[in-house]
Amino acid sequence: MSFVSQFGPHLPYLRRYARALTGSQDSGDAYIKASLSALSEMPDQVDKELSPRVALYHFFHVIWASSGAKLETVDGAGGSPNSADTRLMALAPIERQAFLLTSLEGFTPTEATTILGVSKDEFERLVQKALSDIENQLRTDVLIIEDEPIISADLASLVESLGHTVVGQAATRSEAVQMAKDTKPGLVLCDIQLADDSSGIDAAHDILSMFSVPIIFITAFPERLLTGDRPEPTFLISKPFQENTVKAAIGQALFFH
């Protein structure tokens, strides 16, 4: 089986994971590029006893953990590695990795322990630590941009259960921009396709032109925004979403912001 046919279908989601780990598209995509380069040079290092998706994420974590010279392009320049790798590792501790693997990427606990190379007991401890850290984060005001009333209500309920305050629920680009201007939220949850056929991405660009705020995009077709070929979202969750998926994305977005 060729490299492309074996791992290609899983690359968009590994790209999503890497962006969530690093808190930026540029850094996350750079780690993916470095990992794929290493994989092409060392194909025998892939564990053939694992499923392709688990094997790919496990290899990525080997590169992530080793860091150093293989990831010298993370800071956007060549040359010898610098402290950027150390800072990124500090910003994505292993407990966050454990939680993201199961909640954002949908791996089973058994698969995640294989990817991280930890025991089942250690994995459970890491996930509980991540949940505790997220629950102890500073509370913020949240703007929800979603044209489906039921989904919007579900998001609002989940956001409030985490201790945050929903300051607005918009269904169109114009509503979203006005609400953002009026409320200055600390976080935005944004659907891609809005009620009047306007774009959530356009709404996000408008909001970001006014002030800096972390934005999490929600879409039924995440792979369309995970190509790595253009500016794309750092934080992205799929519809239909699970509670822990949203919780993980919010935790990471606020963690880096």
Image: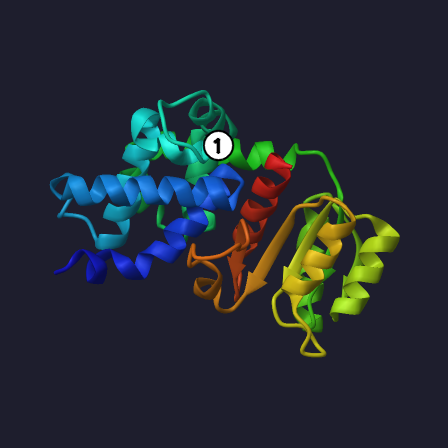
Q: What's the amino acid at mark 1? A: Ala
Q: Quadrant of residue 110?
A: top left
Q: Secondary structure at mark 1?
A: loop
Say left or right for 40 vs 210.
Answer: left
Image quadrant for the N terminus? bottom left
Q: Is residue 151 above or below residue 140?
A: below
Indicate whether 111 appears above or below 222. Answer: above
Percent across and percent down for residue 196 are 72, 79
151 shown above or below 141: below
Q: Which residue is depicted at the point 67% across and 78% down?
A: 197
Pick the residue in front: 242 or 18.
18
Q: Dividing the picture into quarters, in which one does residue 228 lie?
A: bottom left
Residue 7 screen position, x and y as percent? 25, 56
Residue visible at 55% across and 65% down in the picture? 219
Viewer-nearest residue: 151 or 193: 193
Residue at (39, 57) in percent of width and height = 12
In front of the other: 215 or 249? 215
Q: Is residue 118 left or right of residue 39?
A: right
Quadrant the C terminus occupies: top right
Tell me if residue 119 can be seen: no
Q: Is residue 91 left or right of residue 94?
A: right
Q: Which residue is mark 1?
A: 92
Picture quadrant of residue 155: bottom right
* Coordinates of residue 135 in the picture (x, y in percent): 63, 37
The x and y percentages for residue 189 are 66, 56
Colour mapping:
rainbow
